[in-house]
Image (cartoon, rainbow, N blue to C red):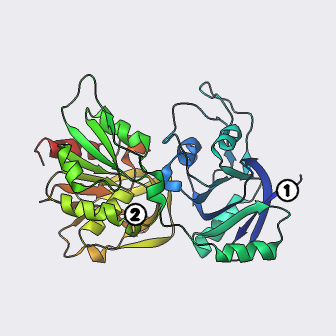
Amino acid sequence: MEYNKKMVLEDGTVYEGRSFGSEKEVFLELVFNTSMVGYQEIISDPSYTDQAVVMTYPVIGNYGINDDDFETEAPSIGALIVREYSDTPSNFRCNKTLSEYMKEAGIVGIRDVDTREITRKIRDIGSCKVLITDIATPEDEAKKRLADWNYAHDQVSRVTVSGRQSLKVVRGGSGLHVVAIDCGMKGSIVQSLVDMGCDVTVVPFDTSFEDIVKLKPDGIFVSNGPGDPQDVKETIELLRRLHGKYPIFGICLGHQMLSLSYGAKTYKLKFGHRGGNHPVKNLLTDKIEITSQNHSYAVDSDSVKGTGLEITHLNLLDNTVEGVRHVKDRAFSVQYHPESAPGPQDSKYLFDHFCDLMKGGC
């Protein structure tokens, strides 16, 4: 077995492997995901912009790629790192291999590395910078170049929708109009809103307050997305002006930005939450939900005091904040992804609640 690629971590650790997908050189943030399935959704989720994702499940690629399960048409993930890559997929919907798609989309892949060891490394040192380069690149040169590279702060502006988009429910609509603020929104979230009978207008993250008012929404949705929520000042200020004007529902990055708009604070987790089996307790019902998660930042629980927000959900693995609400303003948000449905229907009530608020209920 001849290695042709290597990963250089910012602590100096080097892992050698073989390439699949795109073979370009990339500087990225190294994270891990514990999901057993869903690699197509992962590589097409805009929240993974500029990240190299280590998959802890040992075999990736065995069901290939299909046309129906993409979260976005223009993926922005940096790299996928796997233990064993399968280039002979078996699935009736498959129309190309994972490697073929990753080459087309410019996504780097590394196989035949010890993903268990790399995951343990990330858990020890935290999410970190990584350079994926050719095996022949001198290590001293690679380490110096990696040290000089810094994380970007413009991810949301790169993945937001380029202009206004409208999705109309043709039959069986509820008559509710949702304006969805796109900060890197997954397609399955929009589909969940449409499935509830809502007409959805998707707008860029920096849309003005005045333009949103002109759209005459019944409710505002603020999406997931990549990066540090504190970088997205335009959306935070927009949400601040929208307080109390319309019901607001936020997911993931949207949850963080909604919290920031009320004066709470956020911080970066050591290695984040990425996987499909995180237990979350709903403090309002005492029920436990099995959730899908993908985030690097969390809302500081102490900072919620005095903001008017109430903590509604907690992560049972580390007690981090997973949901908040502002009763008077009809605003609420969750850190996890209810549209991913690992439960599978544990969290569908959140979309029902949003619709009830838009109808004037509670």
Identify which amino acid the numbered label 1 is placed on: Tyr
Three-letter code for the amino acid on which mark 2 is drawn: Leu
Q: Is residue 249 above or below residue 230?
A: above
Label 1 vs label 2, nearer the camera: 1
Identify the mark at residue 183; answer none if there is no mark.
Answer: none
Q: Residue at x 59, y 70 (%)?
A: 123
Secondary element at tag 1: loop
Q: How far apart, in angstroms, are the residues tagged by discs 1 and 2?
A: 41 Å
Query: Residue 97: horizontal and vertical position, in percent?
Result: 69, 35
Q: What residue is shown with label 2?
A: 316
Q: Earlier in the sequence, mark 1 or mark 2?
A: 1
Taking depth in this image into account, of 188 and 178 the one nearest to the observer is: 178
- Left/right placement of residue 60 relative to residue 261 reads right
- Residue 244 in the figure: left or right of residue 102: left
Q: Nearer the viewer, residue 59 or 9?
A: 9
Q: Residue furthest top?
A: 171
Give yes or no for contact between labels 1 and 2 (Cβ–Cβ under 8 Å): no
Residue 62, percent across and down?
A: 68, 37
Q: Which residue is mark 1?
A: 3
135 horizontally vs 213: left or right: right
Q: 301 above or below 348?
A: below
- Point out residue 98 in the picture as x, y percentages from the top left corner: 67, 39
Instruction: Compare residues 96 and 348 and report the one nearer the observer.
Output: 96
**Is the residue marked by circle 2 packed among few (<14), some (14-19), or many (20+) residues within 10 Å?**
some
In which image quadrant can residue 307 be found?
bottom left
Q: Is residue 285 left or right of residue 111?
A: left
